[in-house]
Every structure is written in C-alpha cells, then in structure tokens.
Image (cartoon, rainbow, N blue to C red):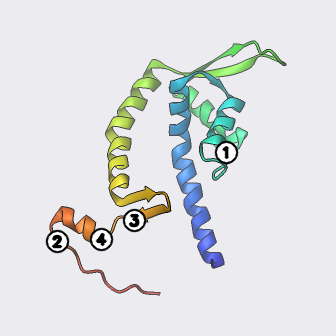
C-alpha cells in the first residue's frame, strides 16, 4: 500500500477515534461506575487493539464532561493502593445520552448497515444496484480521475 494511503487511513482513524471516544465513555458509564484506568483499559479492549486510547486523553474528556455536569465523580477505597476516583453519569448525562442515541446514532447505524454488510469473509459494500433499487433508478458514475 502506498505511503500516502497509509497517511490517509491514519487521519481517518484519528478523526473516527476523536469523534467516538466521548460517546463510548458515556455508554460505558451507563453500564457501571468506573475509574479512569478501568475506562481506558475497557475502551482499548473494545477495538481488540485496533484503536488505542491514552489515559491522559480519557482523563481530559472526563474533566470536560464533569465541567458540563454530564458526569460526576467520587472517591472510593481500593483493595490495593490509594482511593480511586470513580465516575458516573448524572441524570442530565443519562438524558442527553439517550436523546443523542435516539436522534443521531440509531439513524446513522441504520444507514451504515444499509451500506456495509459484514459476513464471514469480511466487509462487503452494498452494490450500487442494490442501493439504486431502493431509490428506483441508478445514477451514472463519472469515470475515476487520478
């Protein structure tokens, strides 16, 4: 793969990661209260090593979410070492997460599923004729330019 392609893919990864991390943190906190290292470790496990998050970045996001009163925190003793700072969603955070999920994520998810299909061999993109069948006609594509 050409070096320029690698650069493009890295840029897409950064943008995808940046846009997704706050939402993923909120989803994880919806499940249970977590401390910073636990959140980072769980986030890194979600992508099976494909995308990695730094603890410092996760803490910066938590600080911003706390300032906006979307998450709150409390100290709890630890079986090992000093007390840990646990984070939890506020009622406001829970409501905003619910609204965003309903208004944005579910709609986007439906569109992604329509365009991308995954089977045992990997990702397949829906054919243009399949997409055209939904709209009733197929548009002519101009030739690719290099």
Circle on res. 125: 3
Circle on res. 17: none
Question: Where 118 falls versus 5 (above or below)?
Answer: above
Q: Are marks 2 and 3 in contact (CB under 8 Å)?
A: no
In depth, the one of 123 and 63 nearer the eye is 123
Report the side of 52 relative to 125 (left or right): right
Of the numbered discs 1 and 2, the one sitting upstream in the chain is 1
Tell me where residue 39 sits by quadrant: top right
Q: Are marks 4 and 2 in contact (CB under 8 Å)?
A: no
The residue labelled by disc 4 is 128
Crowding at mark 1 (Cα within 10 Å: few <14, some 14-19, many 20+): some
Marks 3 and 1: which is nearer the front?
3
Of the numbered discs 3 and 1, the one sitting upstream in the chain is 1
In the rendered image, residue 98, in percent from the top left (x then y), is placed at: 38, 30
Spatial CA distance of label 2 from label 3 is 18 Å
The residue labelled by disc 1 is 53
């Amino acid at each position: 793969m050409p070096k320029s392609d690698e650069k493009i893919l890295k840029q897409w990864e950064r943008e995808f990661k940046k846009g997704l991390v706050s939402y993923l943190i909120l989803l994880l906190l919806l499940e249970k209260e977590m401390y910073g290292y636990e959140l980072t470790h769980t986030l890194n496990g979600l992508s099976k090593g494909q995308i990695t998050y730094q603890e410092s970045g996760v803490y910066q996001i938590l600080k911003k979410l706390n300032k906006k009163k979307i998450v709150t925190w409390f100290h709890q003793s630890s079986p090992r070492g000093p007390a840990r700072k646990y984070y939890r969603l506020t009622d406001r955070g829970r409501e905003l997460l619910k609204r965003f999920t309903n208004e944005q994520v579910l709609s986007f998810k439906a569109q992604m599923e329509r365009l991308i299909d995954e089977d045992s061999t990997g990702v397949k993109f829906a054919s243009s004729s399949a997409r055209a069948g939904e709209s009733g006609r197929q548009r002519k594509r101009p030739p690719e330019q290099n």
